[in-house]
């Protein structure tokens, strides 16, 4: 039932939001240039990788040494708006349609984080990652990594249709209020850097 709901919701979302997708794509092409979409490998259910698609929100500005400048310096007014309104996430509906993601679940994080989780934190990968999730309606990017991962695991243990609907409705309200867009004092969510673990990465999903 969840997969059917995800497929139907993503299909309707792509159809109904197609004018918005087109306008956002044109604005990005004008203000940021090509490419319009930003693909990135992310771990899905059971840690299996997939390509996540988002709208591009940053410029490619580099310093004198050729290194990308910090996120805050590469975010222009359009990029900040897209992140604040979560419009940059809309292409992920394609990932939901394909079955890489769900409408609701723990947000897919970076592949390099896989070896940094405790076994308990790694349980967030027991379900498909989501377009929105329990952590997103309980602080979004403004909470600590510890709290975010704890909320993800809580969702895994308590997931239900009723909870998913509750998360979707609350997500709409939070996005409209533009709450928790970034971590305090940062342009984006800072990198997840926990204390050194004794658990080897290969044991996380064994």
Image: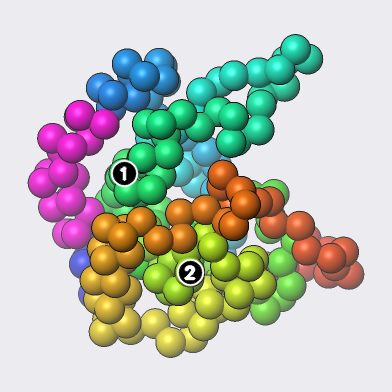
Q: Position of residue 194 (x, y in %)?
A: 78, 63
Q: Specify the label residue 139 is tagged with.
A: 2
**Picture residue at 36% right of the left edge, 19% below the top:** 31
Q: Residue furthest top?
A: 64
State the separation of the CA atoms marked 2 and 1: 18 Å
Q: Position of residue 179 (x, y in %)?
A: 40, 61
**Residue 9 drawn in magenta:** yes
Q: Quadrant of the N terminus?
A: bottom left
Crowding at mark 2 (Cα within 10 Å: few <14, some 14-19, many 20+):
some
Query: Observer-nearest residue: 94 or 162?
Result: 162
Work out whether mark 2 precedes mark 1 in sequence or the reverse, and give the earlier one: 1
| Viewer-closest of 190 and 93 | 190
- Name the image quarter holding the C terminus: bottom right
146 on left or right of 2? right
Q: Which residue is mark 1?
A: 87
Mark 1 falls on what kind of element?
Answer: helix
Q: Is residue 19 magenta?
A: yes
In the image, residue 42 sits, relative to residue 7, either above or below, namely above
Residue at (38% x, 48% y) in the render: 84
Instruction: Establish if 72 lies above or below 36.
Output: below
Quarter of the view holding residue 178: bottom left
Quick one: 32 or 47, which is closer to the camera? 32
SS for dot 2: loop
Q: Find the magenta span and give its range.
A: 8-24
């Amino acid at each position: 039932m969840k997969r059917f709901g995800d497929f139907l919701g993503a299909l309707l979302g792509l159809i109904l939001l197609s004018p918005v997708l087109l306008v956002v794509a044109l604005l990005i092409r004008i203000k940021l240039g090509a490419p319009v979409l930003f693909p990135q490998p992310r771990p899905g259910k059971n840690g299996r990788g997939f390509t996540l698609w988002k709208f591009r929100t940053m410029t490619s500005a580099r310093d004198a040494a050729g290194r990308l400048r910090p996120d805050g310096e590469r975010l222009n007014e359009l990029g900040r708006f897209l992140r604040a309104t979560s419009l940059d996430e809309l292409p992920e509906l394609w990932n939901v349609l394909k079955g890489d993601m769900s409408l609701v679940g723990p947000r897919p994080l970076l592949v390099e984080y896989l070896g940094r989780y405790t076994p308990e934190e790694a349980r967030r990968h027991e379900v498909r990652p989501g377009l929105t999730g329990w952590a997103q309606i309980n602080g979004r990017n403004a909470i600590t990594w510890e709290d975010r991962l704890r909320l993800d695991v809580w969702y895994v243990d308590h997931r239900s249709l009723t909870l998913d609907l509750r998360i979707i409705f609350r997500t709409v309200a939070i996005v409209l209020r533009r709450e928790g867009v970034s971590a305090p004092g940062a342009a984006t969510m800072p990198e997840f850097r926990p204390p050194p673990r004794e658990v080897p990465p290969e044991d996380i999903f064994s």
